[in-house]
Image: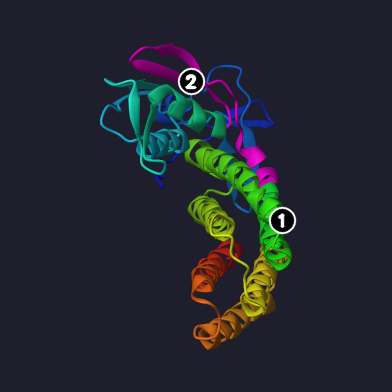
Amino acid sequence: MVKLKRKVIQIADSTQLISLPRKWAQKHEVKKGDELDIKEEGSKIIVSTEQGQSLGRVEVDISNLDRDSLMFLIRCLYIKGYDEMKLRFDDVTTKHHKIGKDVTVISSIKEEVNRLNGIEIIQQKENSCFIKDISEGVIKELDTILRRIFLLLIDASKDLVKGSKENNHMLLDTINEKHDTITKFAAYNLRLLNKFGYTDDKKTNTLYHIISSLDEIIDIIKYCSRFVTAHKIKLAKDAISIISDVQETLSLYHDFFYNFDLKKAEKLSKDRSIIFDKVGSLVKKVPANNLFILSNMEQILEVLIHLTVSRIGLEY
């Protein structure tokens, strides 16, 4: 943080002015007549603008990338905050390793763009593609979207429990849709944090970690549901019990996040240890194909304990 000093200018009897740092005003494109947000925090006054930091345009050659890598690249550029992306490529097809086939580069680009909020393909040629941000996102949207992420994540975890209990593969398949929506919301929130920073700047990095971690949890839940449906597995009752315990722990973290109480942090830690002990006792009891699920449940618990530490950090 750069500290600057400004002299107070007295205008008439009741008005006092200070000037804005020129570099800051230029960086955030502040012009005559613009409105700025003023926030009082004790002896401090925080001046901010809803105009996010713009990284402008980036041009990347994606010729040697497979389908997944080029999609990850687009998502990374989007999250980082670029408003315009020009992608160049020599071949019109790329490797899709998951299905063992070649797919068109354009179809892969379109698939990823459709997963991201506010950007569109505005120009498409034989060997290039131009993507642009057509939205006007504001950091005030972040809290509302974060609540949606939590609710969708809780719903997905409940679907995993219910689908596993009832051996309902159709219900488990719907988790893929929830995953895509959560990933879309998470990427948008991370982009907002990169462009604007959170309203309380000290919380920006911590919120970035929390949102990324929630996205990681839905990935794990998705992989579990896919594993069960792909291999047509009927999980043991003890394994389903572990899934249910983890789901309840996830719901507890949701409550802890919005209703902070250190006693809930203690319960999260205690429940984690109990579930780990249960998993350890089941390793030689459940069928071998259940172990993948148990291992992933442990991974969710590890992510949740780090999220607990991050939530405490937000409070202080």
Percent from the top left, x then y, of residue 151? 71, 53
Amino acid type of the residue tagged 2 in the rendering: Lys
The residue at which mark 2 appears reads as 132
The residue at which mark 1 appears reads as 155
Q: Nearer the viewer, residue 295 or 168?
A: 168
* Residue mark closest to the camera, 2 vs 1: 1
Left-right relation of 148 to 107: right
Q: Which residues are magenta?
A: 116-145
Q: Is 95 located above or below residue 222 in the figure?
A: above
Percent from the top left, x then y, of residue 202? 52, 53
Quarter of the image where the C terminus is located: bottom right
Percent from the top left, x then y, of residue 178? 65, 47
Q: Which mark sits nearer the N-terminus, 2 or 1?
A: 2
In the image, residue 137 lies in the stretch drawn in magenta:
yes
Q: Nearer the viewer, residue 93 or 277?
A: 93
Q: Are marks 2 and 1 in contact (CB under 8 Å)?
A: no
Q: Is 259 located above or below residue 52 in the figure?
A: below
The answer for how far apart the CA atoms under marks 2 and 1 are is 33 Å
